[in-house]
Structure formats: structure tokens, C-alpha cells
Image: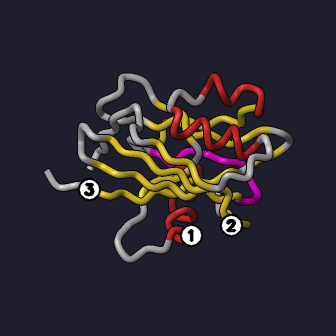
């Protein structure tokens, strides 16, 4: 099996000490997983454009990108997939709302910083975000094993 590469982008939107998280459903997980809003980059799409599109699709918010927060890379050897996620700090006005009929994004919540560790089950999502929010300056986080397998609807 040939190695597949997936580029992801996520956005850190914070208001009043709370971070916007999205509950995403995957075919191989019985319960939704919490993550930052974002998703996969499409062919010929810049990451910034992908992130703006994903925010609109998942939570109906237009966002402006302020800066890159960090890059996280991981491997799922069971599916021969390398994931590279670029997390951005974003800002946006308005209140989030779910798009009707989206099988992927099934919920959202503003989560206090102190509650993020308990909500984010996946280390490749949790550890870079918590380090960044605590003032960490690493910028890059590598995981030889993603610790999770994700199946996409398409």
C-alpha cells in the first residue's frame, strides 16, 4: 500500500477564555470526536482558503486568519496515512450554528481552557493545542503514531 498524505487545517477561535470546538462524526467511531473547527485541504486549495471554507461548512462562521499557531504531523500506519495539520489563530464575529444535513459536524461548544484536556481525546489534537495555549513556542509537534484511525465519509 502506498503512503497517502492528507493536509489538514484547523482554527483556534477564542472568546472570553473559551475555545470553539466541533463534534465530528466518523464512520469508524461510535461517538463524535471533539476537535478544533477545520478539515481537509482540497486539490489546488490554499490552506487559508480551506480553513475559511471549513468554518463556513461546519459552524457557518466567516473567519479571518491572524497567524499560524503550530504544525502537527502524525502517521496512521494501519491505513498508511501521513497527516499534517496546520493550526491557525483566527477571529470571527457572530454566533456559530450547524449547517443542516451535515453528516460530519454534529455539534459545537465553547469550551473553557481548563476543560479542554478532558474533552479532546486524541493526543495529536490535545497536546499541541494545550502547549500552544500555555505559551509554548515549539511550533512543530511530531507523532510517529497518531494513536487513532480515522475513516472519512468520502
Query: Start and end of the magenta stretch?
Result: 90-100
Q: Residue visible at 47% across and 51% down?
A: 73
Task: Identify the mark at residue 65; answer none if there is no mark.
Answer: 2
Classify mark 2: residues with Cα within 10 Å, few (<14), some (14-19) or many (20+): some
Q: Image height check: is 17 above or below 31?
A: below
Is 95 colored magenta in this rendering? yes
Q: Left or right: where does residue 57 sit relative to residue 112?
A: left
Q: Residue visible at 56% across and 53% down?
A: 10
Main SS, magenta region, reads: loop
Classify mark 3: residues with Cα within 10 Å, few (<14), some (14-19) or many (20+): few
Image location (x, y in percent) of residue 105: 48, 42
Q: Image height check: is 65 above or below 135?
A: below
Of pointers 1 and 2, the one earlier in the residue sequence: 1
Q: Residue visible at 53% across and 27% down?
A: 121
Extreme-left residue of the structure = 1
Name the foreground residue: 97 vs 131.
Answer: 131
Quarter of the figure with residue 65: bottom right
Describe the element under mark 2 as helix, strand or loop. strand
Q: Residue visible at 39% across and 37% down?
A: 145
Describe the element under mark 1 as helix, strand or loop. helix
Check disc 1 and report the residue beneath it: 48
Q: Image height check: is 7 above or below 45?
A: above
Name the foreground residue: 18 vs 1.
Answer: 1
Q: Image height check: is 34 above or below 93?
A: above
Image location (x, y in percent) of residue 48: 56, 69
Q: Left or right: where does residue 107 sit relative to residue 143?
A: right
Image location (x, y in percent) of residue 81: 29, 49
Check disc 3 and report the residue beneath it: 4
Name the foreground residue: 71 vs 35.
Answer: 71
Classify mark 1: residues with Cα within 10 Å, few (<14), some (14-19) or many (20+): some
Name the foreground residue: 90 vs 121.
Answer: 121
Amino acid at each position: 500500500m502506498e503512503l497517502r498524505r492528507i493536509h489538514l487545517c484547523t482554527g483556534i477561535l477564542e472568546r472570553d477564555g473559551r475555545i470553539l470546538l466541533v463534534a465530528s462524526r466518523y464512520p469508524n467511531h461510535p461517538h463524535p470526536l471533539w476537535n478544533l473547527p477545520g478539515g481537509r485541504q482540497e486539490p489546488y486549495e490554499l490552506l487559508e482558503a480551506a480553513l475559511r471554507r471549513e468554518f463556513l461548512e461546519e459552524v457557518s462562521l466567516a473567519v479571518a486568519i491572524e497567524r499560524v499557531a503550530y504544525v502537527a504531523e502524525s502517521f496512521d500506519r494501519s491505513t498508511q496515512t501521513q497527516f499534517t495539520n496546520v493550526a491557525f489563530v483566527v477571529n470571527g464575529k457572530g454566533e456559530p450554528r450547524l449547517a443542516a444535513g451535515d453528516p460530519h459536524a454534529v455539534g459545537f461548544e465553547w469550551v473553557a481552557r481548563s476543560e479542554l484536556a478532558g474533552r479532546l481525546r486524541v493526543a495529536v489534537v490535545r497536546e499541541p493545542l494545550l502547549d500552544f495555549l500555555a505559551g509554548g513556542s515549539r511550533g512543530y509537534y511530531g507523532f510517529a503514531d497518531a494513536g487513532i484511525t480515522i475513516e472519512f465519509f468520502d
